[in-house]
Image (tube, helix red, strand yellow):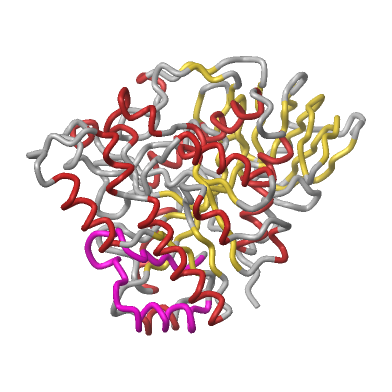
Amino acid sequence: MATLRIVNGTLINEGQRLEADIQIRNGRIDAIAADLGDRPADRVIDASGMLILPGMIDDQVHFREPGLERKGDLASESRAAVAGGITSFMDMPNTDPATLDNDALRDKHARARGTSFANWAFYLGASNDNLEAIKAVDPTLACGVKVFIGASPGSMLVEDTNVLEAIFASSPLLVATHCEDSPTIAANYERLTGDLEGNCPPELHVEIRSREACLKSLILAVELARRHGTRLHVLHLTTADELALFEPGPIERKQITAEVCVHHLFFDASHYARQGALIKCHPAIKQASDRLALLAAVNEDRIDIIATDHAPHTVDEKALPFLQAPAGLPLVQHALLTLLEHWHDDVFTLERIVQKTAHAPALRFGIKERGFLREGYHADLVIVDPNTTTAVREQTLLSRCGWSPFEDVRFRSRIRSTIVNGVIAWDNDRLAADSSAMALEFHRG
C-alpha cells in the first residue's frame, strides 16, 4: 500500500488540538509528530488551515441491501458516507429478508466485500421467535442485537414481553433499541386522524408519534436492562422528557447509553410546514424546546453518541400523502457538516463532535484500533476545510434516492478528503476508483 503524509493540519483528537503531521503506511497511522522531517512518502497532502479528525463511525444506518435496492445498497450508500466523512458504519437488520440469524449476517458480509467504500458491521435483528439465534450469534459477525420495542412493521416488532425479558437476559452482545410504544401510537393515530380522510397536516406527526409513546417504551427498556445487567444502547432520543433516565459522565463507566441523530439536532417541528414528508421519520422530529434540550444533553455527556439513522426512500415514495409516505431520511453525506454548523454557532466544540462521532462509538461497541488518531491504529480520518462552504444540490448527491432534506442549504465547511484504511476514498469532490474498506473487528470478552 502507498505511503501517505498529511502535513500542516490541526488534529482534533482525545480532547486536544495539535498542530502536527501524520504519516500513514500500510493502512495504519505510522507516526504523528510536529515535524516528521523528510521521511519518504508516495503522496503528500498539504492540510494548511484544515482540520484532521478521526473518521465518523455511524452506528445506525439503513443501507437497504438486500431486498430494497431501489432505495439504496451497500455500494451507493457507502459512497455517500465517505463523501461525508464517515469511514465506518453499522447497518440495521430490517432488510428483506430481515437479518435474523448467522446465515443472514454472513450474506451481508459477503455483499459488502469489494463493494462497500466504508468499513462495515451489521446488527443481528430480534423478533418474537429468534431467541435461540440471538443466543447463538457469532460475535465476529455482529456489532450488536437490534430490538424494536414497538413501532416496527413486519417480523422485527418484538411485542411479547416474555421474549423481551429473555432477550435482555441472554443476549451475548450489546442490545440497541428503538423505543416507541405501538399501542400509544395506534391510539393517537385513531384519535387524531379519524376525520381527516387522509389529508393529515405534517405537524400532526409530532402528536401521533408522541413523547408519551417514546417515554413509555424507554422506561420499559431501561427497567429490563437494569434488572438483567444488559448492556443497553438506546437509539435516537427525541424529547427532553427522556433525558432524565440517563446519567451524565464518561461512556466507559456506563451500562446504559444514549444516542441522538443529526436530524433531531438540526430540525424541529417548525420545519414540517416547508419540508413535509421529507423530514418524516420514526421517532418523529419534535419541538424546538426538545432540540435545545438534546443539544444541551450532548454537551453534558448525558447523550453519548451522535449517529444518523440514514434511511433513504425514493422521491416518489416521499411524495405520497403524509400518512402514506414512508419514514426516513438520507443523511450520511451531510451528517458531519450539520454537526460542524453547531461548531460554527458555538454550540459544540470540535473536541465534542469528535468524541461523540468517533471516540464514543469505538469505545461503546469495542471496535478494535479505530475511532482515534493513534500510532498503530487503522488510518481512518477526514480532512475538513472549515473555511470553504458546501452547497447541497441534487447533482452532487450520491445516495441512490437522489434527494436530501438539506437541499438549498449551504454549509459553512467542506469535506476535503476522507481516508479509509490509509487509502483516499474521497478527495476534492471525487470518489476513489476502488474500495479499501474492511469489516470492523471487535474486542469480545
Which contiguous range is marked in magenta? 144-172
Q: Position of residue 409 (x, y in %)?
A: 45, 18
In the foreground, 179 or 399: 179
Q: Position of residue 194 (x, y in %)?
A: 11, 47
Q: Look at the image and tell me in which quarter the N terminus lies.
A: top right
Residue 178 in view here = yes
Q: Residue at x 40, y 67 (%)?
A: 147
Q: Where is 83 relative to 231, above or below?
A: above
In the foreground, 24 or 393: 393
Q: Position of residue 254 (x, y in %)?
A: 67, 66
In the foreground, 297 or 280: 297
In the foreground, 376 or 301: 301
Residue 3 picture quarter = top right
Q: Where is 71 relative to 83, above or below?
A: below
Residue 296 picture quarter = top right
Q: Residue at x 36, y 71 (%)?
A: 126
Q: Residue at x 73, y 48 (%)?
A: 372
Horizontally, residue 250 falls left or right of residue 208, namely: right
Horizontally, residue 69 falls left or right of residue 29, namely: left
Q: Residue at x 32, y 59 (%)?
A: 94
Q: Is residue 170 magenta?
A: yes
Horizontally, residue 125 falls left or right of residue 6, namely: left
